[in-house]
Amino acid sequence: NLKETVTSHLETLTLHPIGNQDHSKPVNDLASAVLTRYKLLGMNEDLEEVIAYYREELALPPHGHPDRSMSFNNLADALLTQFQQSVRMGDLEEAI
């Protein structure tokens, strides 16, 4: 059940607060689950939530860390999806 999956990832995230060395994975897992929900239900607030999680994830590793490239890619993909829905140039420019 997708609702249970999202809830479970939220609970996992509370066990790994910001500052915890393992915080990035639960953020990414939660963002992925909410993105799946967005793709199934099409609720714009889900996509906004996904973008916020990916921005948080991007802010975690220091510059030069190998995980940053994946974080940039995830955020860019979500922003591109948002642009395709909203046609806001700011979303496309940030994705690029």
Image (tube, helix red, strand yellow):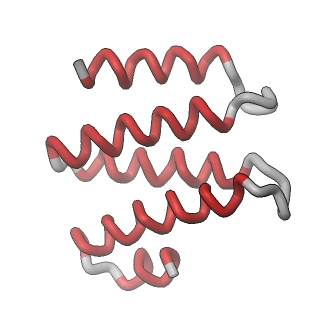
In the displayed structure image, the side of residue 3 where residue 48 appears, left or right: right
For residue 36, above or below residue 8: below
Q: Quadrant of the N terminus?
A: top left
- The answer to whether 32 is drawn above or below residue 67 in the figure is above
Q: Using the image, determine if residue 33 lies above or below residue 51.
A: above
What residue is rendered at 41% in x and 67% in y? 79
Where residue 81 sits: x, y (%)? 31, 66
Image side of residue 89 versus residue 30, left or right: left
The picture places residue 17, in percent across and down from the top left corner, at 70, 24
Q: Name the residue at 34% across, 45% down.
A: 35
Left or right: where does residue 11 sit relative to residue 63? left
| x, y percent for residue 6 | 37, 25
Left or right of 12 on screen, residue 67: right
Instruction: Name the image quarter holding residue 58.
Output: bottom right
Q: What's the residue at 39%, 18% (across, down)?
A: 7
Count numbered badges in the picture: 0
